[in-house]
Image (tube, grey):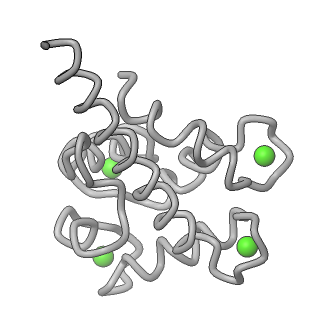
């Protein structure tokens, strides 16, 4: 019985994740050519940076497209980025986190992130500490 419940929960978690990574990918792929490039990632960063001061606060982050759906909390996702930008763990995000995030997802280092790379690598980034 417990096993069945667990598998059910797992299925829900996995399908939520697939939805999250898919919708985030659609946001990141600004020109809809099916791959995400670094400049598109910066474009999304600039959209999330509502007041255009070059930094993203938690409030700006929470209002934009982000990996915040269960099982991930928005705070944890924010911390993930704040741990990878230029001024680490200072409570705001700078553009350094864009490069780090891109690099984490572009596993084969060919300069573009495919839908498959997003699908395979997005969730583990946030789950493995
Ligand atoms: Ca694109
Ligand atoms: Ca800002
Ligand atoms: Ca920071
Ligand atoms: Ca790639």
> In the figure, 119 relative to 125: above or below?
below
Of 115 and 31, nearer the camera is 115
Query: Dividing the picture into quarters, in which one does residue 58 lie?
Result: bottom left
Q: Quadrant of the C terminus?
A: top left
The image quadrant that residue 88 belongs to is top left
Q: Residue 23 versus residue 79: which sits nearer the camera?
A: 23
Q: Residue at x 58, y 45 (%)?
A: 119
Quarter containing the N terminus: top left
What's the residue at 52%, 74% (across, down)?
27
Question: What residue do we see at 30% from left, 46% from top?
Answer: 77
Q: In screen coordinates, is 127 left or right of 5?
A: right
Task: Estimate the x, y position of residue 20 in percent, counting from the top left.
Answer: 40, 57
Whole-percent x, y for residue 100 in the image:
56, 44
Q: Position of residue 11 (x, y in %)?
A: 34, 36
Q: Position of residue 104 (x, y in %)?
A: 60, 38
Q: Is residue 112 above or below residue 42?
A: above
Q: Residue furthest left?
A: 1
Q: Quadrant of ligand 2?
A: bottom left
Q: Residue furthest front?
A: 1
What's the residue at 69%, 47% (across, down)? Answer: 116
Direction from residue 28 to residue 36 in the image, left or right: right
Q: Quadrant of residue 106?
A: top right
Q: Is residue 3 left or right of residue 15?
A: left
């Amino acid at each position: 019985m417990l096993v069945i419940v667990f598998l059910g929960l797992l299925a829900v978690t996995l399908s939520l994740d697939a939805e999250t990574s898919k919708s985030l990918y659609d946001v990141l792929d600004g020109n809809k050519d099916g791959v995400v490039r670094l400049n598109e990632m910066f474009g999304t960063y600039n959209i999330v940076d509502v007041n255009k001061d070059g930094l993203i606060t938690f409030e700006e982050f929470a209002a934009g497209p982000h990996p915040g759906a269960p099982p991930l909390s928005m705070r944890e996702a924010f911390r993930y980025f704040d741990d990878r930008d230029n001024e680490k763990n200072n409570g705001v995000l700078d553009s350094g986190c864009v490069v780090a995030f891109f690099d984490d997802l572009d596993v084969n280092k060919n300069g573009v992130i495919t839908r498959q790379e997003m699908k395979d690598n997005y969730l583990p980034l946030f789950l493995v500490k």
